[in-house]
Amino acid sequence: MTTKSTAGRKLAPANDNTGTEAAARVADVLLLFAGGPRYLGVSAISRELGLSKAVVFRILQSLVSRELLATDPGVNGYRLGQAAAALGASALRRFDARTVATPILRRLRDETGETTTLSGLVGDERVYLDQFESPREIKMTVEIGRRFPLHAGSSGKVILAFLPEDRQDSVLRRTLEPLTDKTITDVDTLRTALAETAREGVAVSLGERQAGAGSVAAPLFGPDGDVHGSISICGPQYRFTPEAIDRYRALIRAASEEIRDNWTWLRDSEAGSA
C-alpha cells in the first residue's frame, strides 16, 4: 500500500453529502438517548444504527468532549451530559407551554398560597422549568434546571403514568433509587400507584422526593396529545392535610386542562396566521 503526499497540493473540498451524512449520524446517536435507556454502550448503538463500532466510538468521544454525553465510574456505557440537559431545558423553556402556563400557575399560587411549578420531560427524566414561590415565610422552592428521576415525587410520577407503555416499562426496568425513605422503589407498588394516577389524572407525594415536602401534580399535555411535562402545587408536608390535598386535586386538574386548551389554541392561531 502506498500513500501520496498532499504537500503543495490543494485538497478537494469536502462533499456536502458526506458532511450531511456525518451530521445525521451524530444526530441519530443523540436521539437514541432521548427515549431509550439511560446508559447506552458502543455495541448497542452500533446494532441499533447499523454503524461500525469504530464510527460509533469516534462519535461518542466527540460528544463526550463537548459534554453532550458523559460516562460514570463503574458503569459500562454513556449517558446524556450536562450540555445536553442544558439544551433540553433551554428548548423546553421556549416552548409555548411556558408562555401559556405562566399566568395560570401564578394565579394558582395566589389561590393556594403555595409554590407552583412547571416541569418538562427531558429524555426519561424531568427538570423544573419555572416556579412561582409562595408568599409565606415557610415555603418550598425548587432548583430550576436540575434533573430528577420520574419515579420519585408527584411531578415525575404523573409524567411517568402517561408515557407510552414501552417508555414507561423502560424506566421501570431500571434500579429505582430512593431519594428519601418514602420514595417508592418497589416496581409492583409503583405500577399500582401509576395506574391510579392515570385514572385520576393527578399524583400526590408526601415526602417521596424531598423529605418533609408535600405536592400534588397534574400532567402537561401538548397539542399532539402527548405528555410533555407536569405542573404542581408544593409546600411543607404538614400543610398538605387530606382536606388541602382534596382541594388541590381539583385546582391542579383544572389548571392542567386550561393550559392544554390554551396551548392548543395558541398553536392553531399561530398556524392560521403563518
Image (cartoon, grey):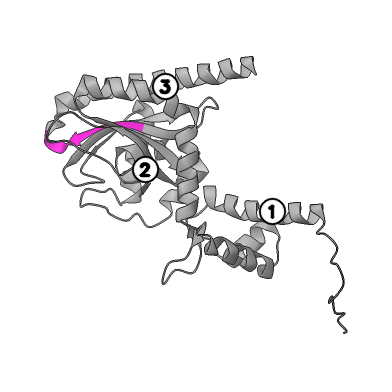
Measure the C-alpha gap from mark 2 to mark 3: 27 Å
Measure the C-alpha gap from mark 1 to mark 3: 36 Å
As drawn, is 171 to the left or to the right of 26?
left
Q: Which residue is mark 2?
A: 191
Instruction: Give me the disc on residue 259.
Output: 3
Badge 1 amino acid: Ala
Q: Quadrant of the N terminus?
A: bottom right
| Rendered position, 6 above or below 265 | below
121 inside magenta stretch: no
Q: Nearer the viewer, mark 2 or mark 3?
A: 3
Asked whether residue 17 is in view, the answer is yes
Q: Residue at x 35, y 35 (%)?
A: 130
Q: Quadrant of residue 243?
A: top left
232 inside magenta stretch: yes
Q: Magenta stretch: dominant SS? A: strand
Q: Which residues are magenta?
A: 231-238
Residue lying at the far bottom of the rendered structure:
1
Count residues near mark 3 (Cα–Cα under 10 Å), then give few for <14, some for 14-19, many for 20+.
many
Going from N to C along the chain, the mark reached first, 2 or 3, is 2
Q: Residue at x 52, y 18 (%)?
A: 266
**Image mark count:** 3
Q: Which residue is mark 1?
A: 23
Q: Nearer the viewer, mark 1 or mark 2?
A: 1
Secondary element under disc 3, as helix, strand or loop, is helix
Badge 2 amino acid: Arg
